[in-house]
Image (cartoon, rainbow, N blue to C red):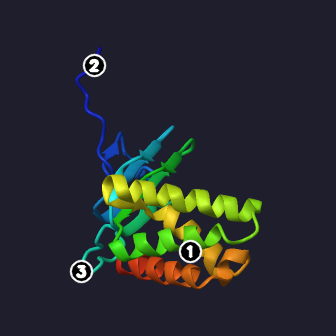
Amino acid sequence: MTSGEQEPQEGEERAGEPVAPSPGGISIGVLTGGAVAAGEGASAEDRSRRSGRPEPPAAPPEAPRANPGGIAIGAMTAGAVAAGPNAKALDASEQSVGVPPELRTAMRTLREQLSLLSPSDETSELDARLAEAEEEAGATGQARCDRFQWLRERLDLGATAAAGLASAAAVVQQITQLLGSQGWPA
């Protein structure tokens, strides 16, 4: 049942007392992907699949003014944000990129050369990850960026016997160029 009386708006008064602005909240200038939630028990989840990296706005806006205890974001191109006492944010999105033929060839060559090394857990894991990336690229023409990041890190660190192979350097170079062209950090 309602009394017919409306709740006062922010900054209005009721019975001579000012109404305080509600704390917290999220202010976003530009949102081109992701999930946002605010308030008691807030929950935000992004499980999207994206091809490439979202383009940020040409001129990112200034972050809007946030309420006290809130969050202000100028531009958000992906991810998840939640604000509130029981807030939860989860970014489980998958971003993928097109795999050029040169990279597929370099991965295949590396897998062939891996078979020449003494078998180890490292070479087995690397071979399996390369096979997954090749299979995904063969089926869709794309592969998940996190796969390439893992491969680049393993091969670029020089921590494995495979890192010394010339074909490993070619794979790292191709991945770095591919991810760099998509705006991923080197």
Reading the chain from its start, which is encountered first: label 3 or label 1? 3
Residue mark closest to the camera, 2 vs 1: 1
Report how far apart the C-alphas of labels 2 and 3 lie in the structure: 48 Å
Q: Is residue 60 visible?
A: yes
Residue 72: x and y in percent read 41, 65
Type of the residue with mark 1:
Arg
- What SS does tag 1 mark? helix
5 relative position to 170: left or right: left
Residue at x 33%, y 57% (from the top left corner): 50
Dot 3: few (<14), some (14–19), or many (≥20) neighbours within 10 Å?
A: few
The residue located at (31%, 67%) in the rendering is: 54
Q: CA distance from mark 2 to mark 1?
A: 62 Å
Q: Position of residue 49 (x, y in %)?
A: 35, 52
**Above-or-below relation of 3 to 183:** above
Q: Are marks 2 and 3 in contact (CB under 8 Å)?
A: no
Give the foreground label among 2 and 3: 3
Locate residue 107, reporting x and y percent. Answer: 49, 70
The secondary structure type at the circle numbered 2 is loop
- Badge 1: residue crowd in 10 Å (few <14, some 14–19, many ≥20): many
Instruction: Say which mark, if any, is on residue 2.
Output: 2
Work out which quarter of the rendered image holds the N terminus and state it. top left
Say which residue label 1 marks: 152
